[in-house]
Amino acid sequence: MSILVDHVTYLYETGTPLEHKALDEVCLEIKDGQFVGIIGHTGSGKSTLMQHLNGLLKAHSGHIYLDGEDIDAPGYPKKKLRSQVGLVFQYPEHQLFEVDVFTDVCFGPKNLGLPKEEVEERVRKALLQVGIPEEYWKQSPFEISGGQKRRVAIAGVLAMQPGVLILDEPTAGLDPKGRREILDQIKKLQTQTGMTVLLVSHSMEDVAEYVDRIVVMNRGKILLDGAPKEVFCHVEELEGVGLAAPQMTYVMRALRKRGFDVDEDAITVEEAAAGILRALS
Amino acid sequence: MLRDITIGQYYQTDSVIHRLDPRVKLAGTLLFIVSLFFFQNIGGYLAAALFLALVIRLSKVPFRYIVRGMRAILFVLLITVTFNLFLTPGRTLVELFGGHVRITYEGLKMAFFIALRLAFLIVGSSIMTLTTTPNHLTDGLERALRPLKVFKAPVHEVAMMMSIALRFIPLLLEETDKIMKAQMARGADFESGNLIQRAKAMVPILVPLFICAFRRAADLAMAMEARCYRGGEGRTKMKPLVYGRADYLAYFLLAVYTVGSIFIGRL
Ligand SMILES: Nc1ncnc2c1ncn2[C@@H]1O[C@H](COP(=O)(O)OP(=O)(O)OP(=O)(O)O)[C@@H](O)[C@H]1O
Ligand SMILES: [Mg+2]
């Protein structure tokens, strides 16, 4: 599904002295099937923007179109919107509440009013997609590990089979191995189903390897937008807003300064290694 | 929505009222509330309104902000008013539904005064919390209650518990907001259905909320222990409370208000 964000402005705490703009005339177009990384410093408005996309927050001005239809238009079915734009919140494991993992994942599809068989079918599929094997399905969601909780929560949204999946910092607080596993699974899912995926993060390393496009946000505005390599060319601008390019970009820059003829746009360790070998041979 | 609830919250700014000793503000709130219960005519309420307006003005807290916080208790206010309006015996003013329901002259008067009293009570006590940080409030309460120590009352602990409870209000509201949104993103519906369905719809919010509250409380306890907190015994103050000139003046004005308003209110 495609999304068009057209000059969206949003203010928190309107009418109080604490009023402030969290989004300032944001424009963004996301094509069907894209895997987009949204990066920005803490408080830059990433989560706020994401909550607009499934109608949890309503823009004070501007419009959002999903497949060309204005989601704030009167009569646009909110329930359908929520099922088509699946939003996984920051620390989604805090929303688990059911007696066991399986029932918890059922919550979403059940709310869509689907028949029981269909619900269970979807839940099984979703749980396997995020890599929760069957032996955990009857356990309490409070007794499994943090990483597993996170996956169960993601499955809870996946089971609604959305056309757009938004993940707000899905890897926050996980160890490097857990991070990789989750991101690998999301990537796999995206290539298999052709889902549009938006991945919010403030770690360049996480995002760089997986996404087709990076959108950098700063103080409620979009600062940079483009393919990872293009975005990482702007190291100074990124650093200016409290972000950094991936470590490999810095390594390659340093090498170049010392007179090695390497490409500066390597992002992953593999690319960097290949680049260095090429320069040496 | 939920974040509109400002009961018990601190409003950061610098004003005469903010700088007053917390004991003065505690005493002031108490006296103000007590005075409300002495009034028998509109004059007393007018005096109270005047006093309140003056304090709000001095405190630099925008009136709009205070009123916004009142919205949360509007419901309680309405119920009280309704009960008083319809259930007070006395001279009949109007009869509705063929005499089954009647509004009496006394009922009307009572409802009006009760509404005023409740509103003043809440605004009065929110002024205290709006202008006093939880730390200050704890200090003040502890000092004010110190005489009770003679009876082995756990004064420090009670004061500490109160300020922690106040601190938890915004945390829990914020958390509720987040959890509600997260469940709405999973298609939960809190707005339609009958009473039972709506009550059931609260489960997905309440369970995570309770878990979160316990987790936060445990974390806080751990953090306090890690910094060697061990109760009030032998604990000294970095900034002991001392009265200044403004505080004595405030006490004097308070005395004037209390005596004056009660005198007017009972004329
Ligand atoms: N519910 C709220 N009420 C008031 N202000 C808020 C609320 N949520 C966010 N804000 C403010 O809006 C701005 C944008 O917040 P947002 O949560 O969108 O940032 P973010 O980019 O997701 O940050 P993070 O990386 O920390 O998650 C911040 O200044 C924040 O303080
Ligand atoms: Mg965020």
Image (cartoon, coloured by chain):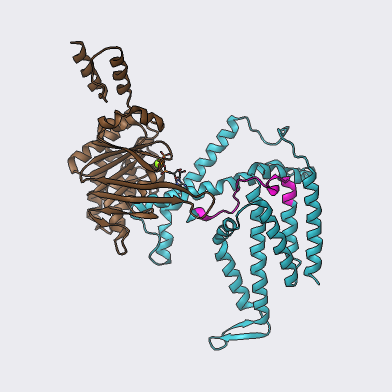
Chain colours: A brown, B cyan
Residue at the extreme bottom of the image, as rendered = B98
Q: Is residue A49 visible?
A: yes
Locate ligand 2 by image quadrant. top left
The image shows residue A190, relative to residue A257, as above or below, that is below
Query: Is B153 colored magenta in this rendering?
Result: no
* Residue A112 sits in quarter: bottom left
Q: Position of residue A157 (x, y in %)?
A: 30, 47
Q: Nearer the viewer, residue A212 or B156?
A: A212
How many numbered marks does the figure carry?
0
Q: Nearer the viewer, residue A102 or A171?
A: A171
The image shows residue A48, relative to residue B2, as above or below, that is above
The image shows residue B119, relative to residue B224, as above or below, that is below
Identify which residue is drawn at 61% across, 71% down: B81
* Residue A141 sits in quarter: top left
Q: Is residue A145 visible?
A: no
Q: Position of residue B189 (x, y in %)?
A: 37, 59
The magenta region covers B3-26
Quarter occupied by the C terminus of chain A: top left
Identify which residue is drawn at 34% across, 27% down: A235
Q: Position of residue A206 (x, y in %)?
A: 31, 31
Q: Position of residue B121 (x, y in %)?
A: 67, 61
- Name the side, left or right, on which B171 lies relative to A136: right
Query: Is B25 colored magenta in this rendering?
Result: yes
- Name the side, left or right, on which A172 lies relative to B102: left
Residue at the extreme top of the image, as rendered = A281
Identify which residue is drawn at 81% across, 63% down: B260
